[in-house]
């Protein structure tokens, strides 16, 4: 399969996994979700929220496709625009960090390395933007949640949060411990493999640009002679 990861754009909403298009676990206050359940459209609310963040802050997601089919996404943003971020026992998010809210993979993508590739794309984007750290509220003991994965019901933490073990595997460290909802942090100023990969890619791009300019100058000189 051919995997592609690209930044989320204003017209790329349909490339998100189906659950992510309708999930407003992070984007709406829980009380507002309950009170508006009978008349609001969560897909409309989600698209409106993403559009607002992208217009004010820039791209807030990385999208993975396999052979052109939606395979997964990672969403992230300043914590101040995420209502749910204030409600955890390990809140608030550090003031120098961007919050990773969503890591969603379609079943077919779970064994194809899409998850780590999405995290790498997120880190690369934030390093280029000068962000110091990426934080996330992890969740532990997913198997103990009796309502996880029930269809047709309001999203649950187990449905919509990121497994703490996955975050640990990606290099995140616990900065606010909790038996269920630890807040975890990835320092982007350290020499992570992610950062090295990004810097190497940037160096290659600069080298190509330099060679191109040299080639243009040589051709111009030949033309003058």
Image (cartoon, grey):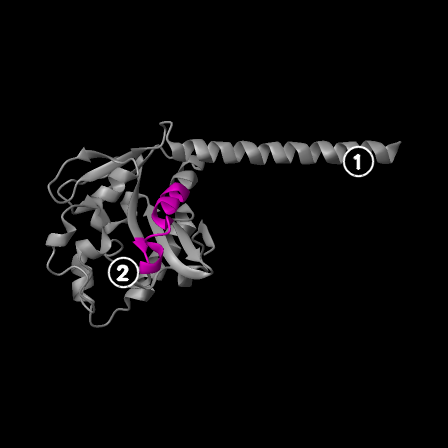
Please indicate whether residue 31 sits to the left or right of residue 124 in the image: left
Of 177 and 140, nearer the camera is 140
| Residue that badge 2 annotates | 23
Q: Is residue 95 visible?
A: no
Q: Position of residue 185 (x, y in %)?
A: 26, 35
Of 89 and 165, nearer the camera is 165
Give the prevailing secondary structure in the magenta stretch: helix
Q: Position of residue 71 (x, y in %)?
A: 38, 58
Query: In the structure shown, which secondary structural element does the residue marked by tag 2 occupy?
Result: loop
| Residue that badge 1 annotates | 219
Neighbours of disc 2 within 10 Å: few (<14), some (14-19), many (20+): some
Residue 146 occupies quadrant: bottom left
The residue that appears at 42% across and 49% down in the rendered structure is 59
Q: Which residues are magenta?
A: 104-122
Instruction: Give the CA separation, mark 2 to mark 1.
Output: 55 Å
Please indicate whether residue 175 sits to the left or right of residue 196 in the image: left
């Amino acid at each position: 399969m051919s995997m592609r990861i690209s930044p989320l754009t204003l017209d790329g909403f349909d490339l998100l996994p189906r659950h992510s298009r309708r999930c407003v676990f992070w984007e709406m206050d829980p009380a507002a979700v309950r009170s508006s359940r009978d008349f609001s459209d969560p897909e409309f609310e989600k698209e409106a929220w993403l559009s607002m963040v992208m217009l004010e802050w820039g791209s807030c997601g990385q999208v993975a496709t396999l052979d052109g089919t939606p395979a997964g996404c990672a969403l992230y943003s300043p914590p101040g625009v995420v209502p749910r971020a204030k409600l955890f026992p390990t809140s608030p998010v550090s003031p120098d960090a961007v919050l990773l809210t969503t890591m969603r993979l379609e079943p077919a993508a779970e064994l194809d390395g899409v998850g780590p590739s999405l995290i790498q794309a997120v880190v690369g984007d934030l390093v280029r933007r000068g962000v110091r750290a990426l934080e996330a509220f992890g969740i532990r003991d997913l198997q103990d949640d009796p309502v996880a994965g029930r269809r047709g019901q309001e999203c649950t933490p187990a449905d919509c949060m990121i497994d703490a073990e996955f975050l640990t595997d990606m290099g995140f460290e616990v900065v606010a411990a909790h038996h269920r909802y630890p807040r975890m942090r990835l320092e982007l100023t350290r020499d992570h493999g992610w950062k090295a990969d990004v810097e190497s890619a940037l160096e290659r791009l600069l080298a190509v640009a330099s060679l191109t300019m040299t080639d243009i100058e040589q051709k111009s000189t030949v033309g003058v002679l």
